[in-house]
Amino acid sequence: MKKLLILLLALAMTLSLVACGGTSGAKTSASASPAATAAGAATTSGKTYNVVWVTCSTESQFWQYQEIGMENACADMEKQYGVKINFTSAGPATEAETEAYISAFENAIASKPDAIISATQVPDSTVTVSKEAKDKGIIVNFTNCGLEPVGSTKYKDDYNQFYTTSSEDIGKLAGQTMIDQLKAANIPLKGTIAMEFSNVNAALQPRMDAFKAYLNTNAPDIKVLDTMYNNNDMAAAQKDIENEIATYGDKLIGIYGANNTSGDGIALAVKNANIADKVITIGVDSDSTEIDALKAGSLDCIIVQDAYGQGYSSLKNAIETLVKGANPETQQQLAVAPQVVTTKNMTEQKYAALLDPTLLKK
């Protein structure tokens, strides 16, 4: 078992080189002025920058969507500034492998890159390695899941930039959407709603707390159950929801899963129980299983973030910080509002690309 664990960790932390190339045109969070661009290109043309993406899961499609944004930004920055970017990625297979994630971050630091981009499920453990990297002169940007929630400044000296979507905004929007969907389905605002999530994470907990608070305020006759945690295991998520369905029966009127793995488990459990027309189901973030479930109706809607845009902006900002010698953003934390994607609007171009950023891959 010990040898197997060592082998798995070694495989998970293997760096995979990604070639950068293509044309400009991807969406960004900020753009430099023509004069600044020209000056930067003049002083950095021909330089090579090494950037490591330390992902918390190589298997999750959500983080793969982030990487597509980074790859496209890599191509755009090479063209804009006349530089070469060696972009590599490292990390464990699943978000549950948190020790392997920290080891991958430490290995990235040891490789002495110019910049590290990461997303963490264990912010408390990541503070130390992020600070170490920054102290060594490495630009450290976080995407989606950072060292602290939006609005906190406790660790502002331990990273360069953070692009995300407010977890509180996700929770509130999910609560509002749940009520709207219940009303549209003519389901009385009285009954039980289950909640499912990956793991305990202080930076992401507002996804659950804000959802519950919104329901408590606006639909007080609805009982919102305590969150079930699945350790980012789809089978565990499905089992949790199957147990809730068996326990609460007709009293169960809604299910909320606050990440894509939880949404997957919800969709599968609801499909197997054949109760799609009896409960309102909401997922967060997207992957192919959730997209198929949205088409089929075993998920009613998905609260999506701009995974592609977050990844793109994180890479773009890292290169521009290196080129300009300072972070070009005026705010260290930038949050983009989440969007609601339903069966009705999922084929519209805007929402289709949010659901499936592979459509944007160059």
Image (tube, grey):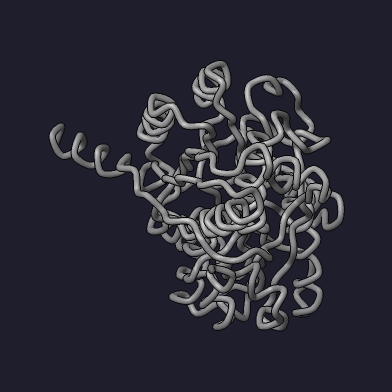
Residue occupying image coordinates x 68% and y 19% = 157
Residue 132 x, y percent position in the rendering: 51, 18
On screen, residue 9 above or below 237: above
On screen, residue 319 above or below 135: below
Residue 257 visible in rendering = no
Which of the 4 image quarters holds residue 123? top right
Image quadrant occupied by the C terminus: bottom right
Say whether residue 123 is left or right of residue 97. Answer: right
Which of the 4 image quarters holds residue 160? top right
Residue 346 visible in rendering = yes
Observer-nearest residue: 275 or 7? 7
Say whether residue 122 is left or right of residue 225. Answer: left
Residue 201 x, y percent position in the rendering: 57, 36
Residue 282 x, y percent position in the rendering: 64, 65
Image quadrant occupied by the N terminus: top left
Residue occupying image coordinates x 81% and y 60% = 176
Say whether residue 288 is left or right of residue 339. Answer: left
On screen, residue 268 above or below 120: below
